[in-house]
Image (cartoon, rainbow, N blue to C red):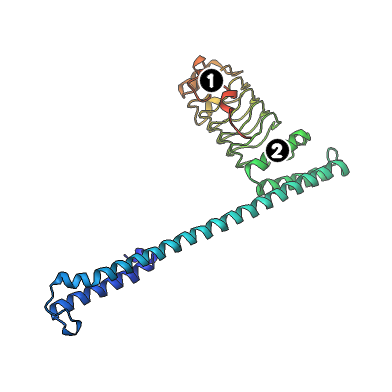
Amino acid sequence: MKKLFKAHPWSMSLALALSICSILIFLGYYLSWRWTGMSGKTFWDWMQLFIVPAVLTIGGVLYTHSRSEDERKRIDASQEAEKQQALDKQREDALQYYFTSLSELLLKEDLIANSKAQVLAQARTITTLRMLDPVRRGMVLRFLSEARLVDLGIGLDSLRGIDLHETDLSNINLRGAKLSRSNLHGSNLIRTNLSNAKLGYADLSGAYLSHAQLDMANLSGTNLSNADLSYADLQGANIEDAQSLKGTNLYNAIGLTNGQKETSKAKGALLGIEAVSPSLPLSSAHVALEGKNW
């Protein structure tokens, strides 16, 4: 009862009003108050005396409460929208500043050959990645790949536990990236270079890894359920140690040993023609990606 009154303060006033009405009806009927003009009336007559006011009172309280709740929800929604807009602007400003500062390091400080500039670039990359949302993080990694800065290791040591779910990371170089315990659920990693990447305990469920390079990748404890690894290069990768391979598409995957194929199949992976059946959600990268907005 205390929780009800605390959650709805108006309910205490309503309960008090109803209690008073009930007491007055009881006393007026049993004590036959003459001053009320209701002496000799039945209990039902007394009830009728208070029913209309009670209904009006209850209706008024409930209506006022409903209006107050609607207004509170509207204000909360407006404040949340303003908060999200401010956060989005902050992230966009951080991204643009990062691109500008890295471009200056590339052009003015000879980033490729200057080790001090590389340290600064790494620090700025780590700081920026922590501030951004998954989509903008993907933009940073694509920038580093296209600028060939990942060849210097910039950004690749700061990805442990990062959230990159449903992010477009296709066709970029993440060779040797330390992505252990990261969230890559549903991400587009088609033709991405993940050679020698550290993907232990990462979530790659539902990810699109068709034609990806995963040779020598560490997949210990990785969740690959319902991921599409068709035609992926898995030479030297310990896919048999993955945490989940349920529904994983390994059709025409390269480099799997017979032992790995048997273990993967036992864990629920699809290796044969059933992996490209039209009835399956991951029948091919093109079908699975249809309608995706990256």
Relative height, residue 257 to residue 281 (above, below): above
The one nearer the camera, 200 or 182, is: 182
Instruction: Provide residue 276's location: percent of width, then percent of height.
Output: 53, 18
User: Label 2, on which residue?
Assistant: 141
For label 2, the SS is helix
Q: Are marks 1 and 2 in contact (CB under 8 Å)?
A: no
Residue at 64 percent of width and 25 percent of height: 212
Residue at 37 percent of width and 67 percent of height: 61
> Tag 2: residue type?
Leu
Instruction: Provide residue 112's location: percent of width, then percent of height.
Output: 83, 37
For label 1, the SS is helix
Q: Quadrant of residue 17?
A: bottom left
The circle drawn on residue 110 is: none
Quadrant containing the N terminus in the rendered view = bottom left
The one nearer the camera, 241 or 144, is: 144
Q: Looking at the image, which residue sits at the far front? A: 37
Mark in the foreground, 1 or 2: 2
Relative height, residue 92 to residue 229 (above, below): below
Side (left or right) of 21 relative to 60 = left
> Tag 1: residue type?
Gln
Whether residue 206 appears in this view of the structure is yes
Quadrant containing the C terminus in the rendered view = top right
Instruction: Provide residue 63's location: percent of width, then percent of height.
Output: 39, 63
User: Label 1, on which residue?
Assistant: 260
